[in-house]
Image (tube, rainbow, N blue to C red):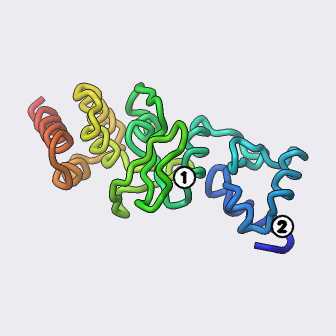
Amino acid sequence: MAGKPNYNLLYGIAENQAGYFSAQQGHESGFSWERLSENAAGGRFARLSQGVYRLVHFPGSPHEDLFVAWLRCGPNSVISHESALSAWGLSDVLPGEIHVVVPRTASRRRKGIRLHTNRLVLDEVTRVEGLPITTAARTIADVANSGLAEEQVRQAINEALSRGLVTREELLVQARRRRGSAKWIIQSTLKLDREG
């Protein structure tokens, strides 16, 4: 977009994303590459990674690495799997890569980011402090199917239930949508929970 930079438009975009924005979003708000660089050099924007910025009057998020990965992957991507589990505070597992669900047309190579092209339905995505992330129920189903240790999945289920992040019904919906490990672990954990 050519023309004068629109700080109000950029602020509105960044405000909904905890202060973070991509260079593409900057361009859509009238900021050329040069203008983005000038604002970063002048201390108005913090440049976090190639093509990813934060408005400096917003504090950094404890999940800044997830915001950077999400913005690098594009606006239709969503934080998922072990990365989402960690963001929900349901595991102390620290994944070696950031897990992101992307559209099938997305680029396949990004250093430090593990891309998934799993289909998501609208009720499986939410925002946590401005970060698009799979719901707790979807996250649990994803990690169960991706091979996370059964004990850790069961612990995440019990923690999510006790904190009110999921309901038994939401977990059962995810189990019905899945085959294999996720279906079995979710159903058996909920059965044990009911019996216990």
Taking the image as drawn, is residue 19 in sight? no
Q: Residue at x 57, y 52 (%)?
A: 130
Amino acid bearing label 2:
Pro
- Image location (x, y in percent) of residue 36: 81, 55
What SS does tag 1 mark?
helix
Q: Which residue position holds label 1?
A: 73
* 20 sits left or right of 165 in the view: right
* 54 sits left or right of 41 in the view: left
Taking the image as drawn, is residue 79 in sight? yes
Q: Earlier in the sequence, mark 1 or mark 2?
A: 2
* 68 sits left or right of 172 in the view: right
- Image location (x, y in percent) of residue 189: 16, 35
Q: Up-down: is 7 above or below 87?
A: below
Q: Which residue position holds label 2?
A: 5
Which sits in the foreground, 43 or 126?
A: 43
| Quadrant in the rendering for residue 122 | bottom left
Sort mark 2 into few (<14), some (14-19) or many (20+) by Cα contacts within 10 Å: some
- Image location (x, y in percent) of residue 119: 33, 59
Q: Residue at x 25, y 41 (%)?
A: 145
Which sits in the foreground, 130 or 105?
A: 105
Q: Nearer the viewer, mark 1 or mark 2?
A: 1
Sort mark 1 into few (<14), some (14-19) or many (20+) by Cα contacts within 10 Å: many
Which sits in the foreground, 50 or 182?
A: 50
Amino acid bearing label 1:
Cys
